[in-house]
Amino acid sequence: MSEKIIFTNGLIDLAQPRLGSKVIYKTDDFFASANRIIDPAPAVFKEGLFDKNGKWMDGWESRRKRNPGHDYLIIKLGKPGKISKIDVDTSHFNGNQPSMISLEACNSKSNSYKNFRWKTLLNKKKTKANSHHFFNISSKSTVTHIKFNIFPDGGVARLRLFGKISKDTINLKNKTTNLTSLLNGASVIACNNEHFGKAENILAPGKAKNMGDGWETRRRRDKGFDWLILNSIDGNKIDKIEISTHHFKGNYPSHCSLQAIYIPNNKTSSSIIKNSKKWKILLDKVKLSANKTHIFKNKLMKNNKINYIKISIFPDGGISRFRMFGKVL
């Protein structure tokens, strides 16, 4: 069975709270908390649920504006980054979505949003009810804060800011650290399946909260195996590798193997995947157990430079976290 490869091209949601991102200001969130707009989970609808202000909605919703102006909120990114694509999600907002939206951004070390100098990231765009609105961003600037404008008022379920953490803001050279941490700029570029849990989750800090906070594929009904490819920080002297199946008890992979390579120049995701079968073995096929952190000492590529890793799981299943400790180049 041929499966469609899922390309993320190394983009992550820079607005997600686990990077330290947070809403620091909003003009109004009378009907639904502004903090919900950056919740990593998909928005849900709860039939018949009301709170003291009205219908409970999973997102940010302001009251009906009765004076001139518009509503907006400001997000401080946990890690400065470059935004390439955004998703304005109005799921479940039907009749109460904004008429239009726009985005502004700035790069500032100030703690006061009143001192920010905003630049337009996305001009005004019309929105539809209960829809995902995807927009490509042409700016190559590193940003620290986002101003999300809605016109004139209304509700938005989620705002996703897809981009890459600016590695030049991370000072880890010659230090030994987790080379595959989201917080250090690591990212997944592609996988063959992530039906039950996003591949990106395995790079997240801390222990997984539940199975949904890991990478889990559908049940395989044919021959083969599942895989993902991630881009780590450039490193060598790889010492320790951790593969955790925490929470995965009846759905963990039987075995796992790792391959790795160092690619000095930017390559397309397609070419990286095509050549991955030829990469060196970082970890031979090993047996995994349920609900356990497996620790392996690197013996095969001790002194090799590495910045791409392919994780193969046999035949399918879920892992919650992956960590690779080495020296940053």
Image (cartoon, rainbow, N blue to C red):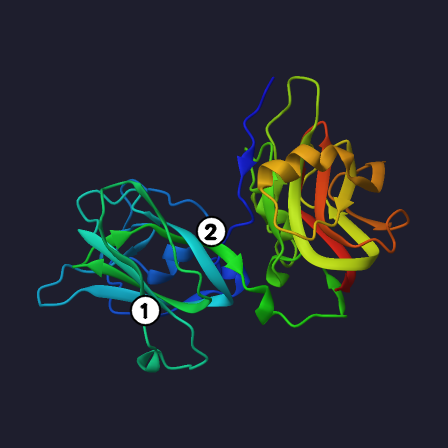
**Residue at (66, 33) in percent of width and height:** 274
**Residue at (61, 41) in percent of width and height:** 215
**Residue at (41, 56) in percent of width and height:** 38
Within 10 angstroms of label 2, few (less than 14), some, or many (20 or more) residues? some
Q: Quadrant of the C terminus?
A: bottom right
User: Toward which corner of the image does residue 116 lie, by quadrant?
Assistant: bottom left
- Disc number placed over residue 43 in the picture, else none: none
**Residue at (46, 47) in percent of width and height:** 41
Residue 268, horizontal then vertical, whole percent: 58, 42
Residue 90, horizontal then vertical, whole percent: 29, 46
- Taking the image as shown, residue 31 lies to the left or right of residue 186, namely left
Residue 63, horizontal then vertical, whole percent: 18, 60
- Find numbered disc 1 in the image and state the secondary structure of the residue it sits on: strand
Q: Nearer the viewer, residue 35 or 99?
A: 99
Q: Quadrant of the N terminus?
A: top right
Question: What kind of residue is marked 1?
Answer: Lys
Q: Earlier in the sequence, mark 2 or mark 1?
A: 2
Residue extending furthest toward the right: 299
- Find numbered disc 2 in the image and state the secondary structure of the residue it sits on: loop
